[in-house]
């Protein structure tokens, strides 16, 4: 079962379907209607294919047993609601894989289910219209590494890794899944800066300030930052970014949320994670805190991404430091 039919969940379900593996995709709203009618359209640099994967309208439509496996692909801000629905239809022993950014989802899942797994997602995908996802990578669709949370590898993790590998993803079962996901977070903390000021803001000194705060907080928390970075960088090299004809990826998953006008963004679980660690360990995180506030404002007010100047944001930072 794949919960969440966006940029990550839809390709996972479609790729499993195309390789003959059973998969049920959970969608909602206009996305469910489009997939139920015509299937999932996944465009890659090599081809565009429509897959008639089984799809249901919402989590409450599922019937789950202890031997079933769920891959959770909703945005982190939607995890709590999804878990409440899932707990109503699933047994305690359900295996749940968190194919999501950030490091908070596994903690939330473990409150409901006894078998929690992390998935480190590296896939340059875009979801901008119902029923269609674009994945800008070839020949691999992306990297989906798995492990038992917070550490370890069991038979379920190995089987999932093999399944994903057969479906066109690079995947390894690793005992260091939490470390790997911390390493991915160190890149994801720049998503909010991109959302506010556009892709060129990543070359500004502000980006280094964001990362410096993150590194200080992760180090205080006991994360082996050097190892986390090394793992994430090593795995990211497996992704071969390519355009789809004349189409290029519009931006990060956070950018896409704001562009689609969802009204929310996952910044609370990326930069917000750094702010929370800063409060816990007495470390100042003014830049990350500002990004959380401003990105949430932009999403809530429905403003277009990339419309804040770097000079304006820098002035705001200076005023707070």
Image (tube, grey):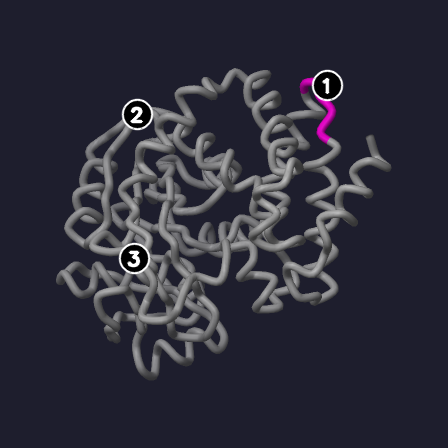
**Residue 203 location, x and y as percent?**
57, 42
**Residue 12 location, x and y as percent?**
29, 57
Q: Secondary structure at mark 2?
A: loop
**Residue 20 location, x and y as percent?**
13, 62
Label 2 with label 1: CB-CB less than 8 Å:
no
Residue 51 visible within the image:
no
- Which comes before the other along the chain, label 2 or label 1? 2
Residue named by callout 1: 282
Label 3 with label 2: CB-CB less than 8 Å:
no
Question: Looking at the rendered structure, which numbered label has been put on residue 12?
Answer: 3
The magenta region covers 281-285
Please give the name of the residue rendered at 55% of the width and 23% of the height, measured from the top-left corner.
218
Please give the name of the residue rendered at 25% of the width and 61% of the height, measured from the top-left corner.
23
Q: Secondary structure at mark 1?
A: loop
- Which comes before the other along the chain, label 1 or label 3? 3
- Which comes before the other along the chain, label 3 or label 2? 3
Residue named by callout 2: 175
């Amino acid at each position: 079962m794949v919960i969440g039919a966006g940029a990550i969940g839809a390709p996972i379900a479609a790729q499993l379907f195309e390789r003959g593996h059973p998969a049920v995709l959970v969608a909602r709203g206009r996305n469910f209607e489009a997939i139920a009618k015509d299937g999932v359209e996944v465009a890659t640099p090599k081809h565009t294919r429509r897959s008639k994967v089984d799809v249901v309208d919402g989590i409450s439509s599922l019937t789950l047993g202890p031997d079933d496996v769920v891959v959770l692909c909703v945005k982190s801000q939607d995890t709590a609601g999804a878990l409440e629905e899932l707990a109503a239809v699933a047994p305690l022993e359900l295996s749940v894989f968190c194919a999501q950014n950030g490091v908070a989802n596994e903690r939330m899942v473990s409150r409901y289910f006894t078998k929690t797994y992390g998935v480190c997602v590296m896939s340059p995908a875009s979801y901008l219209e119902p029923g269609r996802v674009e994945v800008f990578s070839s020949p691999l669709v992306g990297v989906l590494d798995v492990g038992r949370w917070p550490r370890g590898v069991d038979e379920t993790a190995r089987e999932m890794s093999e399944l994903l590998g057969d479906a066109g993803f690079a995947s390894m079962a690793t005992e260091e899944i939490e470390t790997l996901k911390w390493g991915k977070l160190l890149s994801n903390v720049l998503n909010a800066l991109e959302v506010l000021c556009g892709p060129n803001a990543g070359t500004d000194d502000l980006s280094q300030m964001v990362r410096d705060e993150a590194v200080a907080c992760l180090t205080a928390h006991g994360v082996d930052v050097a190892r986390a970075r090394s793992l994430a960088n090593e795995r990211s090299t497996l992704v071969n970014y390519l355009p789809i004809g004349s189409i290029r990826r519009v931006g990060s998953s956070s950018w896409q949320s704001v562009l689609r006008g969802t009204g929310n963004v996952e910044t609370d679980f990326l930069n917000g994670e750094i702010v929370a660690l800063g409060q816990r360990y007495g470390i100042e995180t003014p830049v990350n805190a500002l990004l959380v506030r401003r990105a949430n404002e932009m999403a809530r007010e429905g403003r277009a991404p990339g419309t804040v100047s770097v000079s304006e944001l820098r002035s705001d930072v200076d005023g707070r430091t």
